[in-house]
Structures are given as C-alpha cells and as structure tokens.
Image (spheres, rainbow, N blue to C red):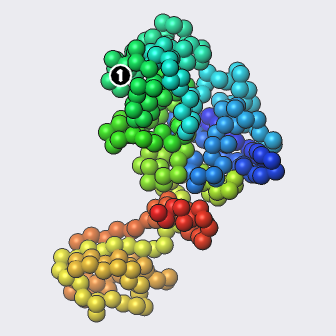
Amino acid sequence: MEQILKINGLKKNFSGQKAVDDISFSINQGSVFGLLGPNGAGKTTLLRMITGIFLPDEGNITLNGNPFEPLRDNGLIGYMPEERGLYKKMKIGEQVLYLARLKGLSKKEAMENIKSWFIKFQMESWWNKKVEDLSKGMSQKLQFVTTVVHNPKLIILDEPFSGLDPVNANLIKDEIFNLAKAGATIIFSTHRMEQVEEICDQIVLVNKGQKILDGTVSQVKQDFKENIFEIGFDQPVLPEHSAIHLFNLKSAATHQLKIQINEGFTNNDVIQYFINKGLNIRSFHEVLPSLNDIFIRLVQGTPEARQFQH
C-alpha cells in the first residue's frame, strides 16, 4: 500500500525541553491513523511540524512521495487544531469561502464545495451568522468543514470530538470514514483511547515526546493479549468447577467465568475440562486488552498512566 506520509527521526526542543524526541513512523494512503498519548506527550508539536507551522530541529518529513515543503504542499493538507482558529466577528459563509480560496480553490469550486458541506451538515441557514453566535458544538462542525472543504489528501484532526454531542460526534465520525473511503488520509490525534479503537486502522502511541509503539490496532492488541477468555454456560457455574492448574479465575458470574489460561495449556484443554465436568458451553471468546489498558501497562506508575485510569 502506498505511503502518503513518512516521518523520520523528528526532534523538537523548546528551551532545552524535548517536546518531540526522535520519532519515526509512516502512514498508508486512505487510512485513519491514530496519534495517541496523554496531554503534554508531544502530539500537537508533532502535528505542527507535519503542517509546517514548526520546523523540526532534526529529522525530515516526506509527503506524497516528496520532501515536505510547507508553501508548496499547503493545499494538500487540512488541519483542524485543538485550539480553534476561526474569526469570531466574521460571517460564517464569507469565512469558509476565504479559507477555501487560501487553499487554492477558485471561487466557483469553493462555493460548490461549501454548499455541499453546508447541506450535509444542515448549515444552510448559517451563512450570515457570526462564529461568536455559535455554540461550541456548532463551531466544531464549522471548523471541520473549513478543514476539509478544499479536498485535502491529508486531513489532520486534533481532538475533533471535543464539545460535540453524540449525534454530531457520529456525524463527524461517519464523514471521517467517507473521506478515507474516497482516498483521503486522516490523522486523528486524541488522548481518548476508546474513540481510536472505533475508527483507526493504524496507531502510534507517544509519551514524553517519544514513540512507545506503533502498528495496526488489531496487531497491537494481539501483541499485548494475556490469554484471557470469557466462557458462558447454560447452567450455573460453581466454585468447585475451577481448576488452578489449568487456569486462573479472574472473575465469576452465575453463568459466566473470566479466566486466564496457564502457560502450557490450550483452549481445547479448557473446553474439554468443562465438558468433563458436565457443563454445556454456550460461548467462548478471547478478551483482548483495550488500548487504554495497554498504555497503562507500558507506563505503569507514571502520572500519565494515572491520567488514563480516570
């Protein structure tokens, strides 16, 4: 699969503090990529280097097969920062048109794209409103439109669901999937791990300016699995049904057990054990760790891990 973005050895210091410390990864075209980490991990600094707002102290960026040049490549990128940057006193329609023209669209192209997005997001009546008159959720929808209106190849969304109600969050989420299907690549930056599991193909996890891990969501979860399974039964399960030599009991309900199979034993050993006990197994499935669990395990005991435990 073609890689649209390659990050190689990026470093950025501020007053002697390492905000980004030798980070490398690549992103496949058409994927939804999760940039994860707690607040202060270096995510925003990394994104600002990818967009050309900051220049790296060391390392290089390749975009669409060429060395990244901010002025030349400006139109290829749509960036929605966590700190929103809309002009509060300016009329909404004029503002979106102005920003679309800055990205290289003709007035005709810009108007066609704006109309399409305004209809899609039920914003047709907003044209003459001002940003200061919008709620936080409405401002978020507007910021998303200004980010994607010029059809960028690389879309960077920093905490895009902040302030959105569930209905509008799902609306944005659906459009992220649609844009990826149409060939755009999305970088989704957040500290909310559960959102990433819903929408991302690949992830990179950063903490204190350093990359901790990267890969596909499914592979990362497979790499950190702990041989834990949930088993459902047709009849009540009793304490004497446990087998310490075969598995450790993690939790129990009337018709369900959560177990960790001991090293040297297999799923078939466990299934046969319960069959021999005369129990009918209704369900049997592996429990993979969440990205949240994986992060806490990687940085156990640090303030960042405690942040994710709340």
Task: Give the side of residue 59 with respect to residue 5, left or right.
Answer: right
Q: Is residue 125 above or below residue 279?
A: above
Q: Along the line of sight, which residue is nearer the eye, 9 or 302?
A: 302
Q: Position of residue 53 (x, y in %)?
A: 69, 32
Residue 122 quadrant: top left
| Point 39% across, 40% down: residue | 164
| Point 70% across, 21% down: residue | 72
Q: Position of residue 184 (x, y in %)?
A: 52, 31
Q: Position of residue 234 (x, y in %)?
A: 18, 76
Q: Badge 1: how crowded within 10 Å, few (<14), some, or many (20+)? A: some
Q: Is residue 138 above or below residue 215?
A: above
Amino acid beneath label 1: Met
Q: Along the line of sight, which residue is nearer the eye, 277 or 233?
A: 233
| Point 66% across, 49% down: residue | 42
Q: Is residue 190 above or below residue 182?
A: below
Residue hosting label 1: 123
Q: Along the line of sight, which residue is nearer the eye, 270 or 92?
A: 92
